[in-house]
Every structure is written in C-alpha cells, then in structure tokens.
Amino acid sequence: MLKKLYIFNITIQDANRRQGFGLAVMAYLATTYRLPITTIKEVFSASGFWRAARLASGAPIETLSISEMDAERERWFPLKPLTDQLDVLISDRLFNKRESWETAVGRGLPDWPASTPDGSLFARRP
C-alpha cells in the first residue's frame, strides 16, 4: 500500500505560469490520492510555488532531505527493473504503436497487478 506520493518535478510552460495550473495539479493529487506528498527536488526558483502549494493543497507536503536520499534509493532499488520495463513498454506504445499518451501510460504492465508481490505498485487510484 502506498504511504506517500512522491513528486520529482513539476514544470509549467513559461506562458502558462502564475495562472494557478501548478496549484491545481497539487490540489488534484492531494484530493485524488489522499496521501502525504513528498518532493524529491525543489529548485530555489520555485520556492514561492512550493510555499503557496503547502498552504493551498490541504495535504502535508514535505521535502526529502539530502540525508534521506540514500535510504530512499535503497528502498526503491528493487522496483528499478519494473520501471525500466514500463519505460520500454510506454516508449513502444507511444512511438511504434502511435497510442495517445493517456492510453500508452494508462495500460501499465501486461501482467498488472501481478507485476509486484502485493500488486500495489501500479494500483489505480482509489
């Protein structure tokens, strides 16, 4: 069972910044998944966004500290083969089969949810 929602990067195109799209994404994630949110990388230039997101999202947002990185990397290491497999499958679906992004990424692994011991890695949202 997932206990946190990890965010590595959120990018909003320059022309669309400061219009609430990033905060809307954070609110969507908070209400859809109802999990604490952990950022893995917060760039200094986005500190205002993260400050606003912490106030507006309604979910706790914490940042993974440098001292926690090695433990997290070790915790997620067993999943690397699955993420590599997904990367290959999604690339094939997008570029060779010409599927839309939503279709290509939404299908997961062919044997989902049996891809992980408890079937939770690629579990659909509640």
Image: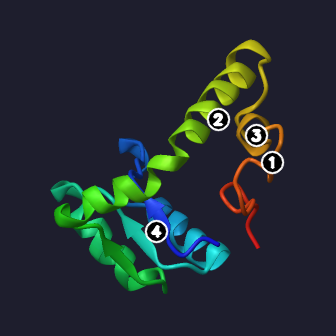
Which SS class for mark 3?
loop
User: Quadrant of the rendered structure where residue 1 is?
Assistant: bottom right
Q: Alpha-carbon neighbours of circle 2 within 10 Å: few (<14), some, or many (≥20)?
A: some
User: Quadrant of the rendered structure where residue 103 is?
Assistant: top right
Of badges 4 and 1, nearer the viewer stands 1
Q: Earlier in the sequence, mark 2 or mark 1?
A: 2
Q: CA distance from mark 4 to mark 1?
A: 31 Å
Residue identified by numbered label 3: 109
Residue identified by numbered label 2: 86
Which SS class for mark 1?
loop
Residue identified by numbered label 4: 23
Circles 1 and 3: CB distance less than 8 Å?
A: yes
Residue identified by numbered label 1: 112
The residue at the point 70 percent across, 62 percent down is 120
Q: CA distance from mark 1 to mark 3?
A: 5 Å
Quadrant, the C terminus: bottom right
- Residue 85: x and y in percent read 63, 31
The residue at the point 54 percent across, 76 percent down is 3
Along the viewing direction, whichever of 70 and 14 lies nearer the viewer: 70
Circles 2 and 3: CB distance less than 8 Å?
A: yes
Along the viewing direction, whichever of 103 and 85 lies nearer the viewer: 85
